[in-house]
Image (cartoon, rainbow, N blue to C red):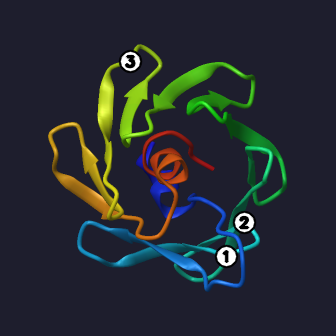
Amino acid sequence: MRTLFLLLAFVLTGELAAQTLQNKNYSTTGYIKPDGTIQDKNYRTVGYIKPDGRIQNAQYSTIGYIKPNGTIQNSQYATVGYVKPNGTVQDKNYATLGYVKPDGTVQNKQYATIGYAKGIDVYWAAVAFFFFDF
């Protein structure tokens, strides 16, 4: 599930530069452009995040959703997890998977750092690191 770690994060508004996704060693694994385009480390488009919460792969097929209340769903609308406002990430049974800290540090449930998503919304960073795979 961490493969999406390379792929997803929150769409930033405005004219900001793409946000960088990094692994625990600070190596760049991907980018998120202001228009919601998700790119891998080689700048190839791998997906999209839409303003209505749809998450799409590079072929524009919907692979999941994030709801305003933090519920994460797959393409069939089945709940796969939850993201709490404080950055705690849980699976569909409410077991803690990890944490997204306010500074963009992403940790597993043992508090070990697994990556960085600085400047990326907590909900979308959680989706990127813990739930979806293109």
* Mark 1 vs 2: CB contact within 8 A: yes
Residue 43 in which image quadrant: bottom right
Q: Please, is residue 13 above or below residue 91 in the view?
A: below
Direction from residue 52 to residue 1 in the image, left or right: left
Residue shown at 53%/76% (left/top)?
Answer: 19
Q: Amino acid at mark 3?
A: Tyr
- Residue carrying label 1: 33
Say which label, 2 or 3, has the lower sequence index. 2
Image quarter where the N terminus lies is top left
Classify mark 1: residues with Cα within 10 Å, few (<14), some (14-19) or many (20+): many
Residue shown at 38%/71% (left/top)?
Answer: 22
Q: Give the percent coordinates (x, y) of residue 14.
A: 72, 78
Residue ranking furthest to the top: 93
Mark identifier at residue 36: 2
- Residue carrying label 3: 94
CA separation in Å, label 1 and label 2: 5 Å
Q: Amino acid at mark 2?
A: Gly
